[in-house]
Image (cartoon, helix red, strand yellow):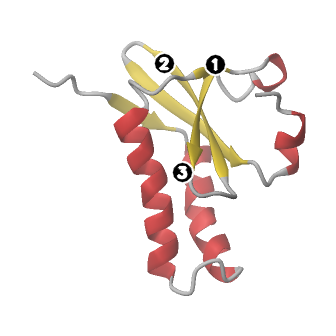
Amino acid sequence: MVRQVKIAYSEEFLESTDDLIYILYSKNYFSFIEDAENYVDKIYDFIRENIASYPAKSTPTDFKKYSESYLLYKANSNTTWYIFFTFKSDVYYVEFITNNHTDLMESFNV
């Protein structure tokens, strides 16, 4: 029997991914809004398919405010997403997402 993984997303994470769709489209990274939506859907697919089995890393001390652990999702050759989450009471709480293009990640030591 396949174990059902329970995942909950913070409001901040949901808002970030919603905003990402419009940012990608408005900055012409994608010509069609549907392509930007598909890009974000792939992030959610990665989380659903990998959060329970992918090797999570412990979040560095300076970033603990985001969560205890994180996953790396390499969307393409230029962009890596950092997906921060906590596992508690059999639920993965996805709390925050950012990528290697943000100023925040300049001090992140992987």
**Quarter containing the C terminus:** top right
User: Which residue corresponds to the image point at 59% horizontal and 58% vertical from the top-left?
Assistant: 76
Categorize mark 3 by other alpha carbons within 10 Å: few (<14), some (14-19), many (20+). some
Element assignment for label 3: helix
Q: Which residue is mark 2?
A: 87
- Per the image, label 2 sits on a secondary structure element best described as strand
Residue 24 in the image: state x and y as whole percent. 64, 72
Which quadrant would the N terminus be assigned to in this image?
top left
Q: Earlier in the sequence, mark 1 or mark 2?
A: 1
Q: Is residue 93 left or right of residue 74?
A: left
Q: CA distance from mark 3 to mark 2?
A: 18 Å
Query: In the image, what residue occupies the spot 65% across and 77% down?
Result: 29
Residue tagged 1 = 68
Callout in the foreground (1, 3): 1
User: Which residue is pictured at 71% across the width and 49% down the height?
Assistant: 99
Q: Label 3 amino acid?
A: Leu
CB under 8 Å between discs 1 and 3 = no
Image coords of residue 14 (percent x, y)? 54, 51
Give percent across and percent down for residue 109: 82, 28
Label 1 secondary element: loop
Q: Which residue is mark 3?
A: 14
Q: Are marks 1 and 2 in contact (CB under 8 Å)?
A: yes
